[in-house]
Image: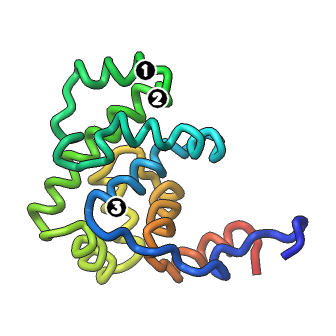
Amino acid sequence: MKQDEPWDITQHAPMPRPKDDDGYFEQMSRAVFLAGLNWKVIEKKWPDIKRLFANFSIDAVAQFNDADIDRLLKDEDMIRSAKKITAVVANAQAMQKVEGEYGSFAKYLQAVKATSEEALLKDLHKRFAFLGESTSVMFLFSVGEEMPQTMKKIQAAHGAK
């Protein structure tokens, strides 16, 4: 593909699915941190962010309290956004609820998506912090979730063929 041609997400091979719920949580957290920021900055800091968030262990991060959030906000290795940090903690707690309700995050995705892709996007937005439509689509694509109707809608909105 030439540099001046638009990138067609539907022509990109699906990403591999995470091996476990902590992997889904890490990818969700990456999408949260990427929202509105430069990809290269996030990728450079990601090893430190991962370390500071207990390697994205859902159970560990769900226990973070105000003191942990303050510690992260003061750490120079962190992207110091209080909204994003608290969103990641809240999302760990929401992941625990999903696990309790569905058994795993992968089962949740399949159950809700069986209704419709739109229902999945709305449910992600309702349950998880910082997951609007575009961030949810980016997250779902990053975990290998194919969203053909959503991709067609995005392409139509952006004039892609």
**Mark 1 Cα shell of 10 Å, populated few (<14), some (14-19), many (≥20):** few
Tag 2: residue type?
A: Met
Quadrant that contains the C terminus? bottom right
Tag 1: residue type?
A: Asp
> CB under 8 Å between callouts 1 and 2?
yes
Q: Which residue is mark 1?
A: 75
**Mark 3 Cα shell of 10 Å, populated few (<14), some (14-19), many (≥20):** many
Distance between mark 3 and mark 2 Cα atoms? 20 Å
> CB under 8 Å between callouts 3 and 1?
no
For the residue pair 101 and 155, the one nearer the viewer reads as: 101
Q: Which residue is mark 2?
A: 78
Against 129, residue 82 (above or below) is above
**Residue 7: % across, % down:** 75, 70
Q: Quadrant of residue 98?
A: bottom left
| Disc 2 element | loop
Tag 3: residue type?
A: Tyr
Along the horizontal axis of the image, is 10 left or right of 86?
A: right
For the point 30% across and 83% down, which residue is it? 114
| Disc 3 element | helix
